[in-house]
Image (tube, grey):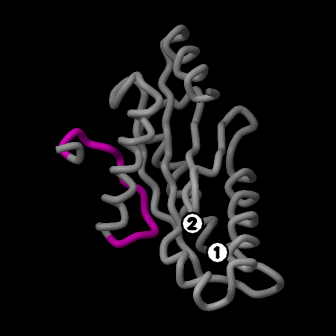
Amino acid sequence: DLLQHSVKRAQRNQQQLAVLFLELDNFNSVNDSHCHDVGDQLLVTLADTLQSCLRGSDILCRWGGDEFVIGLLESSGEASAQVVAKKLCNKILENISVSDKKFLVSVSIGVAMYPDHSAEPDLLIRNADMAMYQAKRLGKNRCALFVPDLAN
């Protein structure tokens, strides 16, 4: 809902908007090695860390499991969105600990832009998701920008 309203606002104000689709790399190993309670705490810490890197006007929501969707409202373009995504990758890599135990986790992030990659929120999320899988294929702990070839 928030993303739908944000796209309408961006359209009305002739602004860009970025959607980031983020997934933890190798999260299942945390659950397998420690337990689901530790995995749940890690996700809460991850969400707090992500929120601390975003502006108050940006949107952060858990999509499911170890996936999050971020809306960078009033984005100034692809380069700006990629700077934020890289900042998130670096911050997560250095900063996740639960119960005084540090976890070496990373994230892969896909980026899709309104209006370049779609005007529909669901398709923006799907395109950012495809770009995230491209980031994983490229070696994880990185971001990738959606390109139309990924949809084929």
Q: Circle 1 sits in a helix, a strand or a loop, which is it? A: helix
Residue at 34%, 72% (x, y): give it: 139
Asked if residue 98 lies left or right of residue 94, the reply is right
- What residue is rendered at 64% in x and 28% in y? 2
Q: Which of the numbered marks, if any, corresponds to residue 129?
A: none
Residue furthest toward the top?
A: 12
Residue 33 at what x, y percent from top left?
A: 61, 91
Q: For the residue carrying disc 2, how many other residues have a C-alpha within 10 Å: few (<14), some (14-19), or many (20+)?
A: some
Query: What's the magenta region?
Result: 139-149
| Residue at image location 54% in from the left, 63% down from the top | 89
Which residue is nearer to you in this view: 13 or 151?
Answer: 151
- Label at residue 90: 2
Horizontal relation, residue 73 to residue 145: left or right: right
> Observer-nearest residue: 34 or 95?
34
In the picture, the quarter occupied by the N terminus is: top right
Contact between labelled residues 1 and 2, with CB atoms less than 8 Å apart: yes
Q: Please, is residue 94 above or below residue 16 in the view?
A: below
| Residue 148 counted in the magenta span | yes
Quarter of the image for residue 64 reads bottom right
Q: Quickly name the residue at label 1.
A: 94
Give the percent coordinates (x, y) of residue 114. Answer: 43, 27
* Kind of residue indicated by mark 1: Glu
- Is 147 rendered above or below residue 47? above
